[in-house]
Image (cartoon, rainbow, N blue to C red):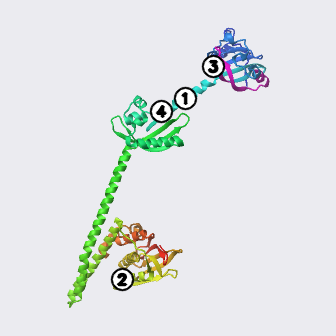
């Protein structure tokens, strides 16, 4: 890199009167440069300096011109004159840092560049040298960085602060005044811990101690006192600088969020308590109603054993059927209430699986026969005879599903199939299928079918009766036993209810 002049410049201070217009323009531009520049001849003697160099070093043109360029530079292993000679002989520019001396004797570090100067013939006749105060440049960058940081810090919408090692705030943003009501000066002259709610003080000190030992960013919540005496809840993110023991923190005001969460929790607890009270009330009422209902059914049976006319017998049969239907509904409500209240218990005993399933068929065979439906069951060869579990709850699930299938089937039949889904040394998972040839369930109703008091069609309640609790109870019983239940069905083409339950192998604990 070279600077080329059409004619050798003569721009030493005080000698501009004899210059041509172009040279005069060049001389003025040279003096106006904001960077300190000096020009040397081939011997390294200063030919000219600009005003910026005088401002930087204190040397005037009269003091500098005619001096060796090295007079500006402190002693070093390699003189600056040697650097100039290398630049001009090798035609390679140089850049580096060099210790410079001001006219008052002060030493400062400067960043310099040096390049040879050529005339119009390509001959090197000198060098141009630029000098910049390295510390001043760093200070300029630091000032700009500080200005950017302050601007960012003050624009943070959340509370932000820097706390010094003595426990006082070193810097806070304007959000402190808008959130807590204190002025900037009031915050800075008050110890940080003085703002914290007394009940949160110990926990806050503990978090500070842990952060001081681990140097990790901490997250914690505490309450800060406002100027009016009230408190705001802050969610803090803080970090610790081990070099100067300062802490940096940003806190989000979550007071309203906490109040909303607390009110939501209270509403939830109130709803749960109301739900428990309702379930207990239903359970108690169902139990109380069952006692007289059993009396009605018993006395009806007694009356049916006496001499009656055909008309009287028909009336009493209707009374008994209605009472038994009502009793089934009461039993469903009682079980549903127990499940909701968390009071349903299971027993673990060894029982004969085939006998349990066949007992369901015996209970329902009369209802199936009344509709001329075929009722059957089948077991895969890998199904064990004896298992450990609750036979009563298993029969209840099968009775609900099979009874439902009979209720919604007009022709054809209902079947139960049992197979082994998986088997281990101490446990066997059984897969039950209850299949019917009934009315079926539309696909868009499948996800609602196991909900409480829900049926595929509201008109079914009027046509077939029932509360819709049977499937809900069955689903919850299956889940409580550790299995799952699902449905396959198409409208008009029957339904198949599947469920799996894990049972213990006979002779082993479940």
Residue that mark 4 sits on: 166
The answer for how far apart the CA atoms under marks 3 and 1 are is 23 Å
Visible residue check, residue 124: yes
Residue 384's disc is none
Task: Indicate which disc, 4 or 2, sits on the residue closer to the N terminus.
Answer: 4
Position of residue 251 measured from the top left corner of the image (x, y, whole percent) = 44, 40
Relative to the observer, which residue lies in front, 198 or 483? 198
Is 85 magenta? The answer is: yes
Tell how many labels. 4
Residue 363's disc is 2
Q: Is residue 108 left or right of residue 165?
A: right
Residue that mark 1 sits on: 144
Relative to the observer, which residue lies in front, 415 or 7? 415
The answer for how far apart the CA atoms under marks 4 and 1 are is 28 Å
Residue 472, by quadrant, is: bottom left
User: Which mark's residue is nearer the viewer, 4 or 2?
Assistant: 4
Q: Secondary structure at mark 1?
A: helix
Task: Indicate which disc, 4 or 1, sits on the residue closer to the N terminus.
Answer: 1
* Span highlighted in magenta in the image: 84-111
Residue 411, by quadrant, is: bottom left
């Amino acid at each position: 890199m070279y600077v080329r002049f059409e004619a050798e410049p003569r721009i030493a201070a005080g000698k501009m009167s004899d210059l041509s217009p172009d040279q005069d323009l060049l001389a003025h531009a040279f003096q106006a440069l904001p960077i300190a520049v000096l020009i040397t001849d081939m011997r390294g003697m200063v030919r000219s300096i600009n005003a910026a160099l005088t401002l930087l070093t204190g040397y005037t043109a009269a003091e500098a011109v005619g001096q060796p360029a090295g007079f500006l530079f402190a002693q070093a292993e390699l003189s600056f004159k040697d650097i100039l000679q290398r630049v001009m002989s090798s035609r390679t520019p140089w850049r580096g840092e060099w210790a410079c001396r001001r006219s008052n004797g002060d030493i400062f570090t400067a960043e310099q560049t040096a390049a040879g100067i050529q005339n119009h013939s390509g001959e090197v006749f000198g060098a141009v040298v630029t000098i910049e105060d390295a510390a001043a440049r760093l200070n300029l960058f630091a000032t700009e960085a500080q200005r950017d940081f302050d601007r960012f810090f003050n624009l943070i919408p959340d509370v932000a602060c820097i706390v010094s090692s003595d426990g006082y705030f070193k810097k806070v943003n304007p959000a402190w005044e808008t959130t807590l009501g204190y002025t900037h000066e009031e915050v800075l002259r008050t110890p940080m811990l003085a703002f914290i709610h007394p009940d949160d003080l110990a926990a806050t000190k503990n978090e500070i101690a842990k952060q001081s030992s681990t140097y990790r960013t901490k997250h914690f919540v505490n309450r800060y006192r406002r100027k009016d005496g009230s408190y705001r809840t802050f969610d803090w993110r803080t970090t610790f600088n081990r070099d100067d023991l300062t802490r940096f923190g940003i806190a989000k005001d979550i007071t309203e969020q906490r109040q909303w969460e607390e009110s939501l929790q209270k509403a939830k607890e109130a709803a749960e308590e109301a739900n428990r009270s309702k379930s207990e009330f239903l359970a108690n009422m169902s139990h109380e109603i069952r006692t007289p209902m059993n009396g009605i059914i018993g006395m009806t049976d007694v009356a049916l054993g006496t001499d009656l006319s055909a008309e009287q017998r028909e009336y009493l049969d209707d009374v008994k059927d209605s009472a038994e239907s009502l009793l089934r509904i009461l039993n469903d409500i009682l079980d549903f209430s127990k499940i909701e209240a968390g009071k349903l218990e299971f027993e673990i005993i060894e029982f004969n699986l085939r006998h349990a399933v066949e007992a369901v068929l015996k209970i329902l065979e009369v209802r199936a026969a009344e509709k001329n439906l075929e009722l059957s069951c089948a077991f895969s060869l890998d199904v064990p005879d004896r298992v450990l579990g609750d036979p009563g709850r298993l029969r209840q699930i099968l009775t609900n599903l099979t009874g439902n299938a009979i209720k919604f089937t007009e022709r054809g039949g209902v079947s139960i199939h049992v197979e082994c889904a998986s088997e281990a040394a101490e446990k066997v998972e059984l897969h039950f299928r209850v299949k019917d040839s009934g009315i079926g369930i539309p696909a868009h109703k499948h996800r609602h079918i196991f909900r409480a008091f829900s049926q595929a069609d509201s008109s079914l309640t009027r046509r077939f009766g029932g509360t819709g609790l049977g499937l809900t109870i069955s689903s919850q019983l299956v889940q409580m036993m550790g299995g799952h239940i699902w449905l396959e069905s198409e409208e008009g083409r029957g339904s198949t209810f599947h469920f799996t339950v894990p049972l213990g192998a006979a002779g082993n604990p479940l």
